Image: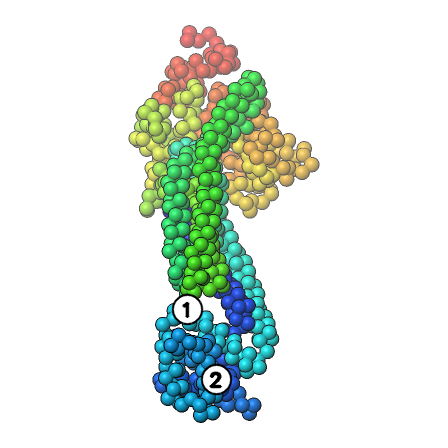
Amino acid sequence: MRVFLYLRSHGLAVLVTVLLLIGCVGCDLALPLMTSNIVDVGIQQSGVDHIATDEMTDETHRLIEQLIPASDEALFASSYERASDGRWRLTDDGREHIPALDQALTVPLVAIHGSPEVGGQPVDLEQMLQAVEAGTVSEEQFRAYGDEAKEALAKESPDILAQQALSAALKEYAQAGVDLPQKQMGYLLGAGGIMLGLATVSMALNILVSLVASRTGARVGHDLRKRLFTKVVGFSDAEVSRFSAASLITRGTNDIQLIQNVTTMILRMVLYAPIVAVGGIVMVLYTNASLGWIIVVAIIVVMGLVMILFKVTSPRFKIMQSLIDRVNRVAREMLTGIPVIRAFGREGLEQERFDGASRKLMETQLFTNRAMSFMMPTMMLVMNLTSVAIVWFGGHYIQQGILQTGDLIAFITYSMVIIMGFLMIGMISIMLPRADVAASRVNEVLSTSSSIQDEVLAKELPQQEQGLSIEFDHVSFSYPGSDEQVLTDVSFKAEPGSTLAIIGGTGAGKSTILKLIERFYDVGSGAVLVNGVDVRQLSQASLRAALGYVPQKSYLFSGTVDTNVAYGCESMPSSQVEEALVLAQAWAFVSEKPEGTFQPISQGGTNVSGGQRQRLCIARALAKEAQAYLFDDSFSALDYKTDAALRQRLASELPQATKIIVAQRIASIREADTIVVLKDGVVAGVGSHASLLKGCEQYRKIALSQLSEEELGIAGDAA
């Protein structure tokens, strides 16, 4: 799955998590074994955990010497030493060889304390030993009875024989006068203390796992958001339009948040499941492998259910993310267009449109939720059936002496731990399909390259005091995905320090020209030249650093007047901000506010008027000290007086800078050095105001639609 790929750059965190989980699993799986020991050893065997007793009577020692195989005589002789009270006590050498000593003493102890049958009659070997000492029974008879007793015991099941040997050890302790209740309590307290310590260590390790998993998940989310934002900022308008702003917002918020949560769960749960499964299987084999087939069947059933649910729900989750995009898009349109919706009384229609998008999302979510709701009760059924099967077959094994009660308890616990590990995977499988879809959507953005790229050896546009020369050389252009030409064979040139105006009807391609200069798009044919160099050969950073741009739609960022005007340079001095405000004819209304340049600005500049917002946007561009300024219909919200004053200040304060003005009003451009007239994307005329009035019919029609012949100075003209 794609989500797992995001962890490749966090290998150390994954390794640390795995090591911590191994520690957690070790502690968790040790607890059932300790519980089994408490039941079997601490309660049933009074704390006696070895067949080789710590103490034994002299009679028992002499009997074992007679019964023990010749191969184990040396081990037995070195394992016990006679004490001053006549008893035999286990030596340090014996404690080092407890497993071998247990095996060597199993049959002799059972023969001594278990009254084995010889010839169909129970035999008390201790009484026979006393009879040997009294001379009523010969040593040959004693050895013959002992050999027959061992042969009879050898036919017993190893598990049953071991239980009999432990019972014999208890009898030996009783004969030796050992305080068994005290021994039992000591064992229980020791085992309980170890269990408490294991539980404490497990808790600490689980806390560390959660901490590492949470930090890693947060880091994955942070890195993805950073990469996604960096990629989107580098997109041209074509890529933004392709994905849509609503979808990009959803991918950068909802999708990445989902990936972050699932990444944390992967580290916390998904990695835990195989570790606990392997560890549990090892402990099951260590405890008793006779019931292992039940767990294998349960695991196969659980994993089969998870795979089926994953396959059924994964396509729906992909649809769900697209529907979330649609809901966000509709909601964004409604919130942005509330004034229009109210003005036309379309609230009901828009509510129905939003309800339709929301209802489709709800129906898809209901399908996936129903499918996933089937999982939990099914998993619980598997767990309960597993418990019943273990108890059923385990009861028979206990009856046959193959299994002890404590082992059965431990086995049930191990099976539940193993199945719970896979149940966690089942639970997270609810989110994994959605996260996989979210990851594919994020990767789709990350793998998309901007259509506007710098050349490998892109040139830098040098800084200079004089303005830029900007030329369109037979430019034709159509927007991506459209066959209609927006500009066709457009040619003109703006000389350094001059003012060039562009005018034309709606949809003539005026704003497109400025976007091509800024290189938001690349031309289809022809070339846009800046200082004689094709903009495609210039680095985007150096090109845009030399341009001051005022977009058609005035947009301000949340902050203050100062942060918006100084947007191009955070360290811009306040004096430069004020100069730009004065030049943009905005200082008058800014200085009237108590906060001055620190007046708060809401997102989009909704707390200032349209004209004020437009002047602040102009001030933002002028504060940049660029070599050329592009005004995209930036004077439309200004009154004629402010418009005239602004143009006059631009001419006097920025004589060296090249100025390109897109405008609808003749009054805003009649003083321009060059005017370009566009009609349906074609240049209808180029020249001064006076020459165009005489030689360009399109310009003349626009001018007469706004001003009278007297105002234009063409009264009495035959035209």
Helix, strand or loop under label 2: helix
| Residue 68 vertical position relative to residue 270 in the rendered view, above or below | below
The percent coordinates of residue 411 (x first, y second) are 46, 59
Asked if residue 636 shows in the view, the reply is no
| Residue 469 vertical position relative to residue 194 in the rendered view, above or below | above
> Between residues 357 and 218, which one lies in front from this camera angle?
357
Q: Earlier in the sequence, mark 2 or mark 1?
A: 2
Residue at x-position 33% and y-position 43% = 455
| Residue 60 vertical position relative to residue 367 in the rendered view, above or below | below
Mark in the foreground, 2 or 1 = 2
Quarter where residue 156 is shown: bottom left
> Between residues 33 and 692, which one lies in front from this camera angle?
33
**Residue kind at label 1, given as amino acid type:** Asp
Q: Which residue is mark 2?
A: 127
In the rendered view, does 313 fall on the left or right side of 665?
Answer: left
Indicate the quadrant containing the C terminus: top left, top right, bottom left or bottom right: top left
Label placed on residue 58: none
Q: From mark 2 to mark 1, how far is it between C-alphas?
A: 28 Å
Residue at x-position 41% and y-position 35% = 316
Asked if residue 512 shows in the view, the reply is yes
The percent coordinates of residue 662 (x first, y second) are 46, 26
The extreme right residue here reads: 594
Quarter where residue 452 is shown: top left
Q: Which residue is mark 1?
A: 159
**Residue kind at label 2, given as amino acid type:** Gln
In the rendered view, does 109 fall on the left or right side of 185?
Answer: left
Helix, strand or loop under label 1: helix
Residue at x-position 46% and y-position 15% = 703
